[in-house]
Image (cartoon, rainbow, N blue to C red):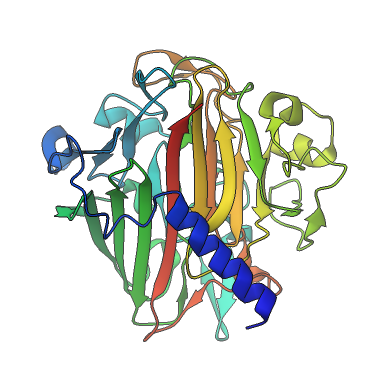
Amino acid sequence: MSTSRRTVLAGAAAGVAAAGLAGAGTAHAASGAKPPARELFGRLADGTKVYRWTVANGGTRLKVLSYGGIVQSLEIPDRRGATANASLGFGNLDDYVARSPYFGALIGRYGNRVAKGRFTLDGRTYQLPVNDGPNSLHGGDKGFGKQVWDVEPFSRGSDRGLVLRRISPDGEMGYPGTLKVKVTYMLTARGAWRIDYEATTDRATVANLTSHTYFNLAGEGSGSVDGHTLEMAAARYTPVDATLIPTGELARVSGTPFDFRRARTIGERARTPHQQVLYGKGLDHNWVLDKGVTTVPGYALTLADPGSGRVMKMYTTEPGMQFYSGNFLDGTLAGTSGRLYRQGDGLCLESQHFPDSPNQPSFPSTVLRPGTTYRSTTVHTFSAR
Ligand code: BGC
């Protein structure tokens, strides 16, 4: 490892510690942190009970469903201490099952698109369900966000959280290998939300897990996120074709609406007439994070809502960030508080490997082999200014 790379990693680790993300080892007891508790949220058609778990710590409150590992609610304070649910979702299970555009869902086995739903690994070609135009999106039509997970609560020192486990059978949604998956949602004493993903396989496969939370820092149902600002440490992004599959190029953001190296207002960028923006009906692209793949979460971005003062920062071990500006919300879904979600009423920031990596040899690899462990960590910190 070169000196400069070591410095970057050390810097990322220091940033994480400074932001209070190193949850374990924080000695003082969290004020008001109760052990996670569950309640019945609904039943699936086959009678399976779905629970909603509540985890609260350091001013943040997370509600998570055993169906899809869905983050149903994310409450955070504004500059006056007033809390709001900053994530889009539904108030009932039926809507999640019947019509959710992945609100709050755990995504797997493969976040974002695989071209034509097909890839070749070790000489064998695998066909996945095609569920987005000609492509496979977010692990197929019954991906991880539509499966039931085993959920176990934990309290460790001042941290509170949930461990979600699931065994994805060999061949599920066309993917090879039995994948044993463990996802940890944790809130630290400072209210940071950390997600750790882990997976092992018994046959060579691909894995790319993420979280599909739609954020609106002013509160879900409060209208558009056009006025939010985003700053992202990414000098390049992956341009796409008309079906949103990367062309393979890592293009520079300078002089394009994709330049968020300084904080920019989202609405203005998502309305800039540019061929790439037209393809996505707004912003719906993968940014190449300057930090690259890291073993400790490194700084990725800052999202801010000037109105409420709420600020979210994200740190990740992943090399990419899908920023989707809620372009396909069309006013037909009534969210948690009963208000209709219209285009741009929420946005997703999905830490990930690049879309279609299984077909793009020049992208960082998403191949997982027996005897190795897939690991990915993303941390969200919340503050107000
Ligand atoms: C994708 C969008 C897609 C959305 C589904 C995002 O991650 O980038 O293209 O429409 O998920 O809600």
Find residue 57 and report its image quarter: top left
State the residue at coordinates (67%, 46%).
285
Find residue 82 and report its image quarter: top left
Q: Tell whether 297 sits left or right of 90.
A: right
Residue 123 shows up from this direction: yes
State the residue at coordinates (73%, 44%).
261
How many discs mark residues in the rendered view? 0
Q: Where is residue 377 in the image (x, y as percent from the top left)?
A: 43, 60
* Farthest right residue in view: 255
State the residue at coordinates (39%, 50%).
20
Q: Where is residue 196 in the image (x, y as percent from the top left)?
A: 36, 59
Q: Quadrant of the N terminus?
A: bottom right
Nearer to the camera, 231 or 372 = 231
Q: Tell whether 9 sits left or right of 76.
A: right
Q: Tell whether 283 sits left or right of 200.
A: right
Q: Where is residue 348 in the image (x, y as percent from the top left)?
A: 53, 39
Q: Is residue 215 above or below residue 141?
A: above
Q: In this view, does 318 lie above or below 44?
A: below
Nearer to the camera, 44 or 270 = 270
Q: Position of residue 349 (x, y in %)?
A: 54, 43
Nearer to the camera, 377 or 336 = 377
Residue 140 shows up from this direction: no
Nearer to the camera, 93 or 353 = 353
* Farthest front residue in view: 28
Q: In this view, does 87 lie above or below 122?
A: above
Image quarter for ligand 1: top right
Find residue 93 and report its image quarter: top left
State the residue at coordinates (36%, 20%).
81
